[in-house]
């Protein structure tokens, strides 16, 4: 499976923020880029196909809802030579950006760090998080959002990562799914709400 780059070279948003910039619901899509959503044989995460389909479904639901959430795409920028080095094929986002959606480029795991993300997400907003990687950007960004007072929802099977090599434990490998479960348990204990894909039909309705 080869993901084709989407030409999304703007770094913040298409135009002025819409009028509903007050308290709101936000869908935050973390690092949905070609390098990690390619097939595993091409360097993508082990569950790239499933996670791509699930997030595509969530994004479609968000865009078609009667009261769409604010949709923010986060794009990681690696260093020169990295698979996600700026303007490389792997750096490109896999989903097209629609009018009134935002793109934020980041350099660190925490998407709030060194970016204008906090200006787009009120502290009383409900934040729905999907994307990559569970044990890096998802963990760091969810933790930062909790710290600033947001209600945070993480969707199971809509975030993922790579298998983890346990360097300090003889090189054992923890498979990606177990890493995801570990992060879910950690974040749930910290205050993140975990929902399943079966909850998605009701996710963007009044609750």
Image (cartoon, rainbow, N blue to C red):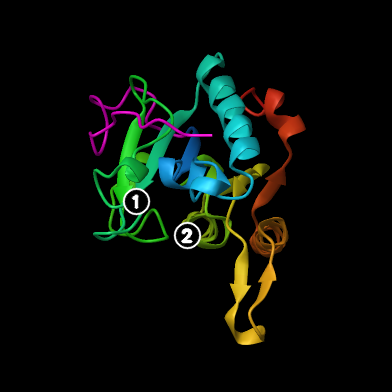
Point out the tag, 2 or 1, that comes first from the N-terminus: 1
For the residues labelled 2 and 1, the Cα–Cα distance comes to 23 Å
Q: Is residue 119 visible?
A: no
The image shows residue 67, relative to residue 171, as above or below, that is above
The residue located at (36%, 26%) in the rendering is 97
Q: Where is residue 45 in the image (x, y as percent from the top left)?
A: 56, 50
Q: Give the range drawn in magenta.
A: 1-23
Q: Mark 2 = which residue?
A: 144
The residue located at (40%, 30%) in the rendering is 4
Q: Can residue 116 be seen in this view?
A: yes
Q: Does the magenta run of residues contain 29?
A: no
Q: Where is residue 17 in the image (x, y as percent from the top left)?
A: 29, 27
Q: Position of residue 201 (x, y in %)?
A: 70, 23
The residue located at (64%, 60%) in the rendering is 187
Q: Mark 1 = which residue?
A: 84
For disc 1, the neighbor class at 10 Å (few under 14, some 14 to 19, many from 20) is many
Total marks placed: 2
- Give 176 or 76, whichever is nearer the viewer: 176
Looking at the image, residue 205 sits to the left or right of residue 7; the answer is right
Circles 2, 1 touching at the beta carbon (< 8 Å): no
Label 1 residue SS: loop
Q: Closer to us: mark 2 or mark 1? A: 1
Dominant SS of magenta comes to loop
The residue located at (55%, 60%) in the rendering is 139
Q: Where is residue 181 in the image (x, y as percent from the top left)?
A: 72, 58
The disc placed on residue 6 is none
Q: Does the magenta run of residues contain 12?
A: yes
Quarter holding the N terminus?
A: top right
Work out which residue is located at the far front of the displayed protein and give it: 41
Work out which residue is located at the far right of the displayed protein and give it: 198
């Amino acid at each position: 499976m080869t993901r084709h780059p989407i030409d999304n070279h703007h770094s913040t948003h298409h135009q002025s923020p819409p009028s509903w910039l007050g308290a709101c619901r936000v869908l935050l899509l973390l690092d949905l880029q070609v390098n990690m959503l390619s097939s595993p044989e091409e360097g993508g995460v082990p569950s790239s196909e499933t996670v791509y389909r699930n997030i595509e479904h969530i994004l479609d639901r968000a865009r078609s809802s009667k009261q769409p959430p604010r949709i923010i795409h986060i794009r990681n920028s690696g260093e020169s030579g990295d698979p996600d080095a700026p303007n490389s094929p792997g750096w490109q986002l896999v989903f097209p950006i629609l009018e009134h959606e935002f793109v934020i480029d980041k350099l660190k795991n925490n998407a709030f760090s060194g970016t204008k993300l906090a200006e787009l997400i009120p502290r009383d907003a409900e934040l729905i998080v999907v994307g990559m990687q569970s044990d890096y950007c998802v963990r760091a960004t969810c933790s930062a959002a909790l710290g600033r007072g947001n209600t945070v929802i993480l969707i199971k099977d809509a975030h993922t990562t790579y298998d983890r090599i346990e360097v300090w434990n003889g090189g054992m490998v923890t498979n990606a799914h177990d890493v995801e479960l570990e992060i879910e348990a950690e974040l749930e204990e910290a205050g993140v709400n975990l929902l399943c894909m079966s909850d998605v039909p009701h996710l963007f309705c009044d609750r």
